[in-house]
Image (spheres, rainbow, N blue to C red):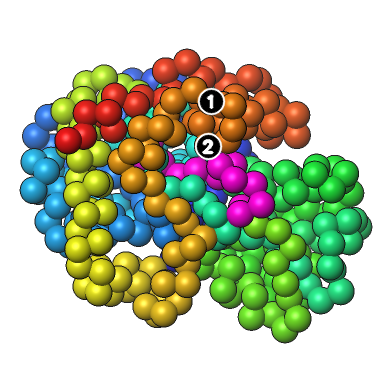
């Protein structure tokens, strides 16, 4: 399963969104109001509940036809959204801002969760501090949130990207390389954390829990789709909160659905709970408001945009005006 089984190989890869290549591309054809909304998601505990939405008929209940598309690779879902092959996708704020910096026109309409421990930097035996990473081989999916987390932790410890040998690998491949002893440390998200920690003597150096609000997960839609289909977007958002109510009312059956989609045992899936903090409706509304901490999306967006430029993962300042669209969570009854 996860937060993003294939984040983004290169932040600005495949950013040829609708309009950048050819207005005639079939993939960029706007669906009619009756066509199913094409929504992508991948393996992350904050997005897996969408399988409950689908299985329990909650999209239909909300009055919106949806084609829910699972991606084994998180990066593939981002590229599909940027190419106009999806209307909306489940992705992080950081990766969304990276796409925006590359020219994609996207809008955040919902916050699913904050990562509060399920993104981790895991190290081999003998590496006990972040400073010990100096000169070591560290794998992560380049330009993704776990790469971002790695750089945040290194900066806090006084290290720069030049102090390590960075090995860019898709998240699943990075976890496998670490477990096989081919790299000294790895940046991964759940459930690949479980796979990585099976390496004897490995430990978590730091996690998203150490950087509150730095990694947030969202439903992100193409700007053009939001403008043309605001009622459909509202119904999608409504269905999400109906899903959270359903999971709370029927925890057993819901857990079975989510664990199966994630490809892990129910016990393992429950272990991810503390590392992913699902936001309530009121917390969603609060997150969209201005503030001075990373729990405020306007503040976080500016900080992430600046950081991505500082470390060379974005060449220009991302245009953030209009990125955050709080009206949909505000309108949920």
Name above or below for residue 50 compared with residue 112: below
Q: Is residue 98 left or right of residue 105?
A: right
Image quarter for residue 97? top right
Name above or below for residue 180 compared with residue 6: below
Residue 169 seen in render: no
Label 2, residues with CA under 10 Å away: few <14, some 14-19, many ≥20: many
Q: Position of residue 136 (x, y in %)?
A: 86, 61
Name above or below for residue 85 compared with residue 179: above
How far apart are the two marked residues, 2 and 1, measured between alpha carbons? 8 Å
Q: Is residue 14 left or right of residue 54?
A: right
Q: Look at the image and give the residue range highlighted in magenta.
A: 208-222
Indicate the secondary structure of the residue bearing disc 2.
loop
The quadrant of the image that shows the C terminus is top left
Per the image, the residue denoted by label 1 is 291
The quadrant of the image that shows the N terminus is bottom left
Indicate the secondary structure of the residue bearing disc 1.
loop
Q: Is residue 196 left or right of residue 183?
A: left
């Amino acid at each position: 399963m996860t937060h993003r089984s294939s984040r983004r190989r290169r932040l600005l890869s495949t950013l040829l969104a609708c309009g950048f290549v050819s207005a005639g591309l079939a993939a960029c054809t706007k669906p009619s109001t009756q066509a199913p909304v094409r929504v992508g998601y991948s393996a992350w505990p904050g997005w897996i509940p969408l399988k409950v939405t689908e299985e329990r008929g909650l999209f239909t209940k909300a009055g919106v036809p949806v084609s829910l598309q699972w991606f084994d690779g998180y990066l593939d879902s981002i590229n599909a959204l940027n190419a106009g092959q999806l209307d909306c996708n489940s992705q992080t704020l950081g990766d969304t801002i990276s796409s925006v910096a590359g020219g994609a026109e996207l809008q955040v309409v919902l916050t699913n969760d904050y990562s509060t421990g399920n993104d981790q930097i895991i190290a081999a035996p003998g590496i006990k501090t972040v400073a010990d990473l100096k000169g070591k081989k560290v794998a992560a999916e380049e330009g993704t949130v776990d790469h971002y987390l790695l750089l945040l932790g290194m900066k806090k410890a006084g290290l720069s990207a030049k102090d390590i040998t960075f090995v860019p690998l898709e998240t699943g491949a990075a976890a496998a390389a670490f477990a096989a002893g081919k790299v000294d440390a790895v940046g991964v998200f759940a459930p690949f954390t479980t796979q990585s920690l099976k390496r004897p003597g490995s430990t978590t150096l730091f996690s998203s829990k150490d950087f509150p609000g730095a990694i947030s997960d969202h439903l992100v839609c193409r700007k053009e789709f939001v403008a043309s289909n605001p009622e459909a977007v509202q119904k999608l958002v409504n269905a999400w909160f109906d899903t959270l109510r359903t999971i709370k009312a029927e925890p057993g059956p819901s857990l079975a659905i989510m664990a199966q989609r994630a490809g892990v045992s129910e016990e393992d899936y429950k272990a991810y709970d503390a590392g992913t903090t699902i936001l309530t409706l009121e917390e969603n509304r609060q997150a969209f408001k201005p503030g001075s901490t990373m729990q405020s999306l306007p503040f976080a967006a500016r900080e992430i945009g600046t950081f991505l430029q500082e470390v060379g993962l974005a060449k220009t300042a991302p245009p953030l005006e209009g990125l955050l669209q709080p009206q949909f969570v505000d309108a949920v009854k």
